[in-house]
Image (spheres, rainbow, N blue to C red):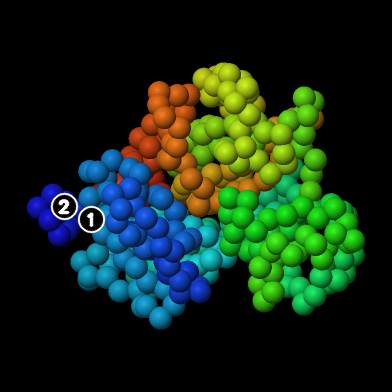
Amino acid sequence: MTDHVAPAKSLFPLLLGIPDNGQAAVRMGQNGAINYVFLGNGRIVTDLAPQTKQRMLPVIFGPGVPLRMPPALRTRPHINAIADADMSQLALQMLEQHLCANDVACFNHPSAVLGTARERVAETLAGIDGLHVPRTIRVRLEEPADLARAVRKNSFVWPLIVRTTGSHRGAATVRIDGPQQAKEGLRGLAWGGHDLYLTEYVDSRDRDGHYRKLRLVIVGGEVFMRHQVVAAEWMVHAGDRDIAALQEEARLLATFASTLLPELAERLRALTNTIDLDYFGIDCNLRPDGRLLIYEVNALMDILINTMPGPNCWDAPIREVREALGALVVDPSRWRHPRREVATA
C-alpha cells in the first residue's frame, strides 16, 4: 500500500474471480508490459477516476484459491467485479457463500450475476410487457445431428443462433439456417464437450435494410444510452458500424433522455428490477411495433472504453456513465443488495 491509498477504514474489497477453467489471458499493455487477465471480470472500476480506484483492494479467488481477506475488510461493503455467469460460476458461488456467512452489502450481487446466464434472462424477462425476448435454451451436443433433435424437442424453428457458453463480442457465434447446415455451422465452434446456447433468430432489419443495436446502460436504476450501431449484417458490433449513419446516432444520443427514454422507462424499470444488478448493459433494438427486442443483458459489456479519437459523439455519454458509476460504487446505501441499512463509506 502506498501513501496515496486511502485509509483502510474507507477501502472496499474488489472481488475478482478466477474462471472455472483456471486460465488467464495474456495481453500486451501499451507500454509493452505483459498483463495477465482473468476473463469473466467486468471493468467496474478499471476505467474510473484514480481517486475512486484507490479505494478498491483487489481480492482474487476461485477454483483452488479460497476467498480470503483481512478481517478489517470482511465486514466492509463488497464490490463484485465477476460479471459472467458461465465462465466464473464457481467463483460466484463461493462469493455467495461468503456473503451469507458475513452478511455484508454487495455491489452487483453474485446471485443476480448468476441470473444473467442467457437462458435465465430469456425466462425471467419473457413476461414483461413491451419486451420481445427470443427464446434461448442451453444444450450439450454429442454429434451435429443432435442439433436438429434439440430443435424439434424444444419446438424451435430455423434459423437459429448457436453460440458457445461464456463467449462474447460475437466470438463462437453462428447463425444456422437449417438442419442441412448444422455440420458446417458447428465446424467453426469449439462445441465438443461444451454447452451451447440455442437462440431463436429474429430478423431485426429495419425498413432501410440495416440492423441497429442500441446499447443502454443501467447505473443504480438510472438509464443511459451508450451508443447505437447501424450495420449491414445481422451480428452487429462496433467494428461493423456504418459510418454514414453517424449523424443518426449522434442525434439519438443528444435527444435520448427527452425522446426515447420516456417511451421505454416503464419497461426498463421492470427489466432492471428483474435483473437486480446495480450496473449492467442492455443490447436491444426498438421494433416498428414498439416492442424492445432484447439481444443481450449482462454486466460484462464494454461501456467506458472509447476506441475512437476524440472529440466525438460518445465522449459525453461515456463521461456521464463514468461519473454516475463512480458516485454509486462508493455509496453502499444505494446498492440493491442487501436490502437493509448498510455501513456508510
Pointer 2 residue = 5
- Between 344 and 13, the residue placed more toward the observer is 13
Give the residue at the far left of this rendering: 3
Q: Secondary structure at mark 1?
A: loop
Q: Nearer the viewer, mark 2 or mark 1?
A: 2
Quarter of the image holding residue 268? Answer: top right
Give the x, y percent position of residue 262.
60, 25
In the depicted structure, whether residue 333 falls above or below residue 311: below
In the depicted structure, whether residue 27 falls above or below residue 90: above
Q: Mark 2 or mark 1, which has the lower sequence index?
A: 2
Q: Are marks 2 and 1 in contact (CB under 8 Å)?
A: yes
Residue 7 seen in the figure: yes
- Amino acid bearing label 2: Val
Sort mark 2 into few (<14), some (14-19) or many (20+) by Cα contacts within 10 Å.
some
In the depicted structure, whether residue 182 falls above or below residue 94: above
**Is residue 178 rendered to the left or right of residue 307?**
right
Tell me the CA gap for discs 2 and 1. Answer: 9 Å
- Between 83 and 307, the residue placed more toward the observer is 307
Residue at 41 percent of width and 62 percent of height: 26
Residue at 73 percent of width and 41 percent of height: 234
- Amino acid bearing label 1: Leu
Q: Which mark is residue 11?
A: 1
